[in-house]
Image (cartoon, rainbow, N blue to C red):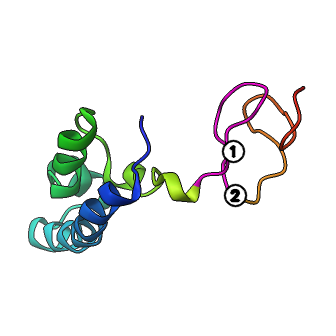
Amino acid sequence: MPFLEEHEWKIISPLLKDSILKIKEYRAEHQCDLATAQLNYNAEASIEFEKITGYKDVHVGSIFHHRLKDMGPECVACGHLFRTNKASYCANCGGKVGKET
């Protein structure tokens, strides 16, 4: 699943916050649990994410974790992104920052 660049994040971010409130409202209105509400509420953030990336039916919670700015650099050994800017090793291959394995 692709990461969002800052210009895309500015579009999605307000929709994510709104989705949380709307899911809470859906739960109250339909007297259902969180999982049911998330399955039945088609969040605007998911719809917009699909327009931007082409990925359909992505859970709102997953979108929160796909902001490119929050990720670290690419691993020189395998090319995967470090999970944070402070990561000291690659979670994919174990490579160290700036060093090949």
Q: Is residue 75 rendered magenta in the image?
A: yes
Quarter location, residue 33: bottom left
Q: What numbered label is drawn on residue 51?
A: none
Does residue 33 appear in this view?
Answer: no
Residue closest to the eye, 98 or 52: 98
Judge the density around disc 2: few (<14), some (14-19), many (≥20) Cα neighbours within 10 Å. Answer: few
Quadrant where the C terminus is found in the figure:
top right
Circle 2 is placed at which residue position?
A: 85
- Per the image, the residue denoted by label 1 is 82
Question: To which quarter of the image does residue 64 belong?
Answer: bottom left
Image side of residue 70 versus residue 100, left or right: left
Q: Residue at x 87, y 28 (%)?
A: 100
Q: Examine the structure image and report whether residue 81 is included in the region drawn in magenta.
A: yes
Q: Of 47 and 11, which appears nearest the observer? A: 11
Q: As displayed, is residue 86 above or below residue 75? A: below
Q: Relative to 77, does residue 43 appear above or below in the rendering?
A: below
Number of residues whose C-alpha sits closer than 10 Å to that of mark 1, classed few (under 14), some (14–19) or many (20 or more): many
Badge 2 marks a residue whose secondary structure is loop
Residue at left offset 73%, top offset 35%: 75
Q: Disc 2 vs disc 1: Cβ atoms closer than 8 Å?
A: yes
Which range is magenta? 71-84
Q: What's the residue type where badge 2 is placed? A: Asn
Q: Judge from the rendering whether residue 32 lies leftward or rightward of residue 64; answer left or right.
A: left
In terms of depth relative to the viewer, which is nearer, 30 or 92? 92
